[in-house]
Amino acid sequence: MKSVLSVPVIFILIFLASCSGGSNDLNRSGLKGKVKATNEFQCDATYVNEQWVADVECADGYRVVEYDADGNYIQSYSMAECGDTTSLSTTKRENGEVVEELYYTRMNMTPKHSKMVLISRTVMDRVSADQVNFEVWQNEQLRYEGATYYDSKGRINKQVQVVNNREVIVHHVYEKNLLVEMWQEELDGSRSATQLYEYRDFDEQGNWTLRLVYPGDEKITPEMAITRLVEYY
């Protein structure tokens, strides 16, 4: 059986430091309607009838992202096939603004017992309408820091991350309000860790239900297919 695929460090901050103002987290995520939660399943991609689709072989667990009735992000968590929560990210807000995100994961204490343990916390500080600085702490030790920059629609435009004195910039590219590309800019200006996204199926509200993820600069063979169920209020 497969396990849930891990996400590279450069991509883990997608839900951090959301903006306040005229938009909400649903709009910035490209979601339409009164969305309560999304459930994402990572599957192999297979070629059928001259197109790529999600294979029946999928990861054992899945990921859930929850929103409140106003369309603001509440928390995200990963679920095992047996129903246990394996990881959890939850937010703290002040005056509607996200100021901290806490990340927990399940640790095995004995062969029969486990518990959720706080692994890291991310502290955020808005310095302007389009910039939020952040620090990621583990056990009271600063792991890395950086800044998230937003476009005119409040979506993440780029994120600067400084880890062990190494600075990288993660760029986000959108088309028709959907994220279609992410790539990492190294200190010398070179490009790495590119991922391209293609959206195939959509529900009645216009939200995607199948996303293909391609490694590299060309859409040749997807490394995975993500199927998504959207729950509404």
Image (cartoon, rainbow, N blue to C red):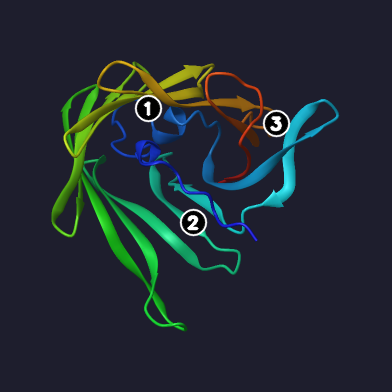
Left or right of 209, for residue 180: left
Measure the alpha-carbon separation of dots 1 and 3: 25 Å
Res. 208 visible in picture: no
Across and down, in percent, residue 147 comes to: 22, 30
Q: Are marks 2 and 3 in contact (CB under 8 Å)?
A: no
Q: Residue at x 56, y 57 (%)?
A: 3
Residue under label 1: 23
Instruction: Report x, y in % for residue 53.
Output: 74, 35
Instruction: Decide: is 137 above or below 10.
Output: below
In the image, taking residue 118 as reference, residue 226 lies left or right, namely right
- Residue 139 visible in the displayed image: yes
Q: Which residue is mark 3?
A: 201
Res 78 label: 2
Q: Residue at x 39, y 43 (%)?
A: 73
Mark 1 secondary-structure assignment: loop
Residues packed near mark 2 inside 10 Å, few (<14), some (14 to 19) or many (20 plus) = many
Determine whether 6 is above or below 223 in the image: below
Q: Earlier in the sequence, mark 2 or mark 3?
A: 2
Residue drawn at x 45%, y 55% is 77
Amino acid type assigned to the residue bearing label 3 in the image: Asp
